[in-house]
Image: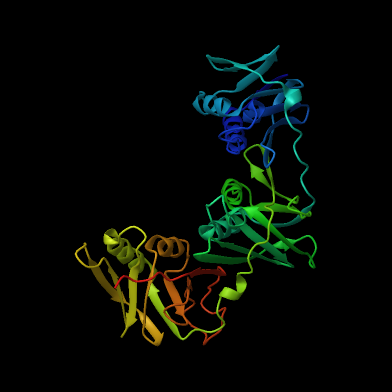
Amino acid sequence: MKFRVDRDVLADAVAWAARSLPVRPSVPVLSGLLIDASDDGLVLSTFDYETSARATLSAEVADEGRALVSGRLLSDICRSLPAKPVEMTLDGSRVSLTCGSARFSLQTMPVEDYPALPDMPAATGTVSSDVFSHAVAQAVTAAGRDDMLPVLTGVRIEISGSTISMLATDRFRLSHRELEWSPNSPDESLAALVPARVLGDTARSLTAGSEVTIALAAGGSGEGIIGFEGSGPGGTRRTTTRLLDGEFPKVRSLFPNEHLTRATVDKASLIESLKRVALVAERNTAVQLAFSDGTLTLDAGSGDEAQASESIEATIDGDDVTTGFNPQYLLDGLQVIDESVVELAFTVATKPVVISGSMGDSGANDSSAGTGDTGFRYLLMPRRLLS
C-alpha cells in the first residue's frame, strides 16, 4: 500500500471516521481505523459492531493495499501535520507517514481480525443537510441519557410520505419535530428508533454538502439498520447504526387538543430572567412561573435560603396560571426554538406545558397552533412547588 493525498482532505476524513471510535473497545482491533487504498482512491472506516463510519476521498494511489492502525493516534497526527501533501506506505507490519520533514512510523493491527462493515441499506430519500441538522438538534433535546432505560435514549423517526417526524422523551419532557423531505417512494411509511447520540453526531457532521441521504432497513427484533450519507471534503461520508430494540412509548397523545391559557413572551427576555432567577434555585427544585395581568413573574428559593424574583411582560389569553418547572429543562427547550417570541400553552397548572415558537396568531384551541414554520413543539412536565 502506498498513496499520496492532500493533508487537509486526509485530516478531515480521518477525524470524521475516528469520531465514532469506542472509548473502551471490547477488543483491541475496534480501536483501529481501516485504510483501504485502491485505484478508486481511499476508503477510511471504523466500526464497533453498532455504528460504522466510512469516508471516501481522492488520492494518488501507487500501490493498492489495506492497513489497520490506531484511529485516535492517526487523527492526532494528521491534525498536527504541516500544510503539505501526505505520503503513507505500508512496510511489513508498520505504516510510515511522511509530510514535509515530519515522519511517523505506526504499528499496524491484524486486518484479518477486523469485522466486516455492514452494507448501506437502500436509499429511502433525501433531505436538506442544514434542515436535517437543525431538526435533529431540536429533537434530541428531550432524549434520555439513562442507559438503564435504553429505549428512551433514542429518537423515534417516523416517515410518512414527504414528512419526517422525530420524537424523543426522557419521561419529564417531550420533543416533537416535523420536517419535509424528498422520499424515493411517495407512499413510504416507516418507523425507526435511532440512538440519539449517534443521530446528533451524524447530523452535525454531514452539513458540508447540500443533501443527506437517509437509508432505512427496518428489520425485526431491533436488527434494523439506518444509514446516512452526505458529502465531505474530497469525497463522501457514510454512517450506519443499528436501531434500538424495544417499544417506544406512545407519546403523541400527551399533546393536548385544547388549551385554556396561552401566554406569549419574548424568548430572549425569558431566557435571561430564567438564568438569573435559577441561580438561587436549590438542586432539583423548581422555578415558579406566575402568569397574571400581562406579566410573567419568576420566583425561586424559599424560607431562610436565598430567594430571587423577576417580572417580564407577557401577553396572556385565558385564565391566570401559576406553576413550576425544572429550570434547566425549561432552558433546554427555549434555547432550541428559532422564533424570537415563544408561546406557552396550558390546560391547567398541574398538567404539562407545550412550548413552541409563536406564529403571532394563537389559533383558538388548535393543537398545531403556535408550532411555527419549524414544526417544533416541546412539552414539559411541571414540578412541585415548595410551600
Dividing the image into 4 quarters, which one contains the N terminus? top right
**Image coords of residue 136 (percent x, y):** 58, 57
**What residue is rendered at 48% in x and 65% in y?**
338
Q: Who is closer to the viewer here, 151 or 158? A: 151
Q: Vertical placement of 249 versus 9: above or below?
A: below
Compare residues 183 and 178 and report the one nearer the observer. 178
Q: Position of residue 197 (x, y in %)?
A: 57, 49
Quadrant in which residue 262 is drawn: bottom left
Say how many tags the image has: 0
Q: What residue is drawn where x is 57% and y is 60%?
A: 135
The x and y percentages for residue 342 are: 43, 72
Where residue 378 sits: x, y (%)? 51, 68
Say left or right for 52 vs 177: right
Which residue in the rendered view is the most extreme toward the top? 92
Looking at the image, which is closer to me, 146 or 343?
A: 146
Identity of the residue drawn at 39% across and 87% down: 319
Of the 4 image quadrants, the one containing the C terminus is bottom left
Toward which corner of the image does residue 272 lie, by quadrant? bottom left
Colour setup of the view: rainbow
Q: Is residue 127 left or right of residue 8?
A: right
Q: Is residue 301 above or below residue 314?
A: above
Q: Is residue 227 above or below residue 256?
A: above
Q: Is residue 250 left or right of residue 171?
A: right
